[in-house]
Amino acid sequence: MRIAIVDDIETERALLKMRLERQLSLYGVETEILEFDSSESFLAAEKERHFTVAFLDIYMKGLSGMDAAKELRKTDADCFLIFTTTSTDHALEGFQVRAFHYLVKPFSEGELAALLAEMLTKLPRPEPILTVKVSGSDVRLRYRDIIFAEHFAHMINIRTTAGKTLATRQSFKAFTEPLKKDPRFFVCSRGVIVNLEHAADFQAAAFCMTDGSRVYVNQELLKPARQAFMEFLLQGGCMR
């Protein structure tokens, strides 16, 4: 998700950016946040690459945030426009440019959090990112790039779609905690988790993965595994 903060007051931009980063990290959303001190610089950047969301201060030197929104709408009908302002006097104009929301300064982080929660339900779901430490460096993995992972000798070995196996030192519980919230993942045993998105079939107590590997399931989990796989397929979740 690419976000623009357009405000001619540096401290306002910095505060909003900090709050956005804090709130969006709770959702595991990969975000690029760019700051602009004028509408003109924002519109120039937007011509090069569209923004998902734009926070526009209405009252700025030069082109106002409202005028910038009108200009933006000539080429971009999808950007979520959120006005940050000291007044709602421009509510009618905001309706005309299909503004998503107004944040009246000074707004609280709670107000911003509620806005983001609503906005994220209306956006195409961004691909979650898992950050793991490999050989002392942070590696960012998209969930979809994980085929399966297994815990052995205090290490998590992660098989990826790039054909590599990454090793990271952490507990299986800590590693799987965020993944288990995603319906693509199924815990096959006390130390193995599989991404159903990359399962081609389920045969003889094992998931047959698209990379040719087989991931075996504990005996007591065979029925739940088959059920989870069938439900995933029926929901159209398989992306092979």
Image (tube, rainbow, N blue to C red):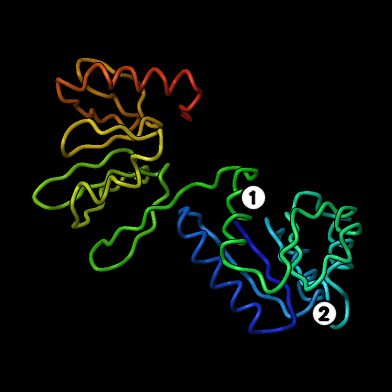
Q: Looking at the picture, which amino acid does disc 1 mark?
A: Met
Q: Which residue is mark 1?
A: 119
Circle 1 packing at 10 Å, graded few (<14), some (14-19), many (20+), is some
Q: State left or right for residue 124 relative to residue 133.
A: right
Q: Could you tell me which residue is drawn at 20 percent across and 22 percent down?
A: 221
Q: Could you tell me which residue is drawn at 33 percent across and 38 percent down?
A: 147
Front residue of this view, candidates 41 and 189: 189
Q: Looking at the picture, which amino acid does disc 2 mark?
A: Met
What x and y, as percent, mark residue 118? 62, 48
What x and y, as percent, mark residue 77? 81, 50
What's the CA distance linking mark 1 and mark 2?
25 Å
Residue 226 drawn above or below residue 5: above
Label 1 secondary element: helix
Circle 2 packing at 10 Å, graded few (<14), some (14-19), many (20+), is some
Q: Quadrant of residue 50?
A: bottom right
Residue 14 drawn above or below residue 107: below
